[in-house]
Image: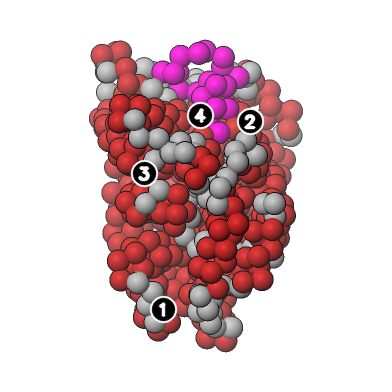
Amino acid sequence: MNVSEILLETRAATNFTWIDFTIFILLLCVCLLVGIYFGFFNVSENAQDYLVGGRSMSVIPISLSLVASFISGISLLGIPTEIYLYGIQYVYIAFGIISMGVVMSIVYVPVLHQLQLTSSYEYLQLRFDKRMRLLAATLFTFTTINWLPIVIFVPALAFNQVTGINVHIITPIVCLVCIFYTCVGGIRAVVWTDVIQSFVMYGSILLVVIKGTIDVGGINVVLKRNYDSGRIELPVTDPSLLTRHTIWGLAIGGFAYWLQANGTSQLMLQRYLSLPNLRKVRWAVFNFVLGILCLLCSCGYGGMLIYAKYYDCDPLSTKLVKAKDQLMLLLVMDTLGDIPGLPGIFLAGVFSAALSSLSTGLNSMSAIVLEDFYKLYFGKPSPLKAEVIMKTVVVVVGVSCVGLAFLVEKMGTVLQLAISLEAITNGPNLGIFTMGILLPWIRAKAAFIGGVSGLLIMAWIGLNAQAAIVTGAISFEGKPLTTDGCQYSFTQSEDVFNITHIADKSEEIFFLYRISYLWYTLIGCIISILIAFIVSYLTSDWNDPQDMDPLLLSPVIRKYFTFKKTDVAKKDIKDKYASEDDHSLDDLSNNIHTID
């Protein structure tokens, strides 16, 4: 064991005290109590209560839940690492987030909310056919099962960094807590634990930012050291798709990624669908964008703070941290470690982000399995059977993801890994929804072929690119790092995680594998739509928009067409939901009225 490893273990042992453990355990206990309350005292009456809170949730808790669900430990630890290694370019994705909020509020959400659906993929059956619904639900399932293990692994890595406790021990313990309160409490427990966790998350970041800035000598020192190293810079305007981060990739590619993740994915839409009317949905979207931007800036500044703290002694080179995504935790222990309880608060914040994302994923999976798989083939189950199905899904998926989490440590940086794997299915999914909502001429057969083609092409590109990164065949040029100011001895790493240079063989890799991961979602979407158009043209199989149900199209498109079945469409939807005990016909009528 070298000196740096001894320093790391000593720092964790001395700085993470019983007070920190108590704070961390207290967070888990509060989450358990919320689950117990909604599972045994304020019990969901039916599947609609369990999955969408009876469509009577309030804007503020839903907004906080949306932010907490989307910002996982991947962001809290991954974004600072990104800034430390590559500079502030990633922060310019804010332009894509803002445009996503506008487009989503006007174009996508009105359709899905007015139809009062429980699963967003039920829309695809109404617009196309059963195959399309099954395809999209399957893509979502694949993406979620790939994403949740990353969400689980990141906080476990953080816990290992500050306590030395093995990730294989802490991961199952924390996940069992999450599985329990999600299983017994449904979406109400998920939302209200998210509210608690969001406050812990915001508070923990502010603690580190404020105390860390004071320790290094003020904000001027932070900015100067980052500016001198080239980390603070204007957006890169290179038009090449191969450049990792450019303003075009961040603003346009980032827009597509965030639109799919927030505007068509069951993970987020299930919260929007729990609100009573469209006006509140739009307020929730606005609050979500504002909350995400605040966290993005805070995490970005955290990355700058890491560099300002270790600008002359890179902890990656000295192996003071075992993985890139432990950098933020090292800063926490150095900054807050002398004050008992503060490291525990930050760790609770990281786990809060992870627990909210995991509970959201599990709750959404229960909705998908019940609505898109079971009901599709076996019809509506009895209330007792529906409850058993939903809770069994939460347990089975949760336990499976715990096992898969240990594969994540073999991959690259968690931020790029997460976006890359999600984009394989995100692009085709966004393409399918876009065809349904904005392109009334596309029929089911062409949309299905387009979606499957987009999936196969993006899987080919994405998996080969990720394999090349893992093996070192593709690497990225990072900002300068130095060990000239280190005050302890260490063994110099010959290859500092393969990030400070570009390997010579990178140029030999097929160019499609070197496309920036930020473009994946948009490329998958465009490929799916183009192939659908080509199939429609070759087969002369087009929809007549006049024969369509106007409720299935975005309000921005409806005004350009005259529909033959407007009154019939309204009546069909009213009749459809009037027969369901767990839907409010009055709420549905109000939502239908908003399209007139």
Structural crowding at the residue carrying mark 2, measured as other residues with C-alpha within 10 Å and reported as few (<14), some (14–19) or many (≥20): some
Magenta segment: 235-255
**Distance in Å between CA atoms under marks 1 and 2:** 42 Å
Q: Are marks 1 and 2 in contact (CB under 8 Å)?
A: no
Please report whichever mark, 3 or 1, sits nearer to the chain's N-terminal start: 1
Quarter that holds the N terminus: top left
Mark carried by residue 253: 4
Label 2 sits on residue: 95
Q: Residue at x 69, y 58 (%)?
A: 593
Q: Residue at x 32, y 41 (%)?
A: 445
x then y, percent, for residue 360 = 49, 60
Would you identify the image quadrant in which residue 418 lies? top left
**Distance in Å between CA atoms under marks 4 and 2:** 11 Å
Q: Is residue 46 magenta?
A: no
Please report whichever mark, 1 or 4, sits nearer to the chain's N-terminal start: 4
Question: Which residue type carries mark 3?
Answer: Ala
Mark carried by residue 387: 1
Q: Are marks 2 and 3 in contact (CB under 8 Å)?
A: no
Question: Which residue type carries mark 4?
Answer: Gly
Label 1 vs label 2, nearer the camera: 1
**Distance in Å between CA atoms under marks 2 and 3:** 34 Å
Q: Nearer the viewer, residue 588 or 514?
A: 588
Q: Is residue 293 above or below residue 167?
A: above
Residue 99 can be seen, yes or no: yes
Please report whichever mark, 4 or 2, sits nearer to the chain's N-terminal start: 2
Label 3 sits on residue: 444
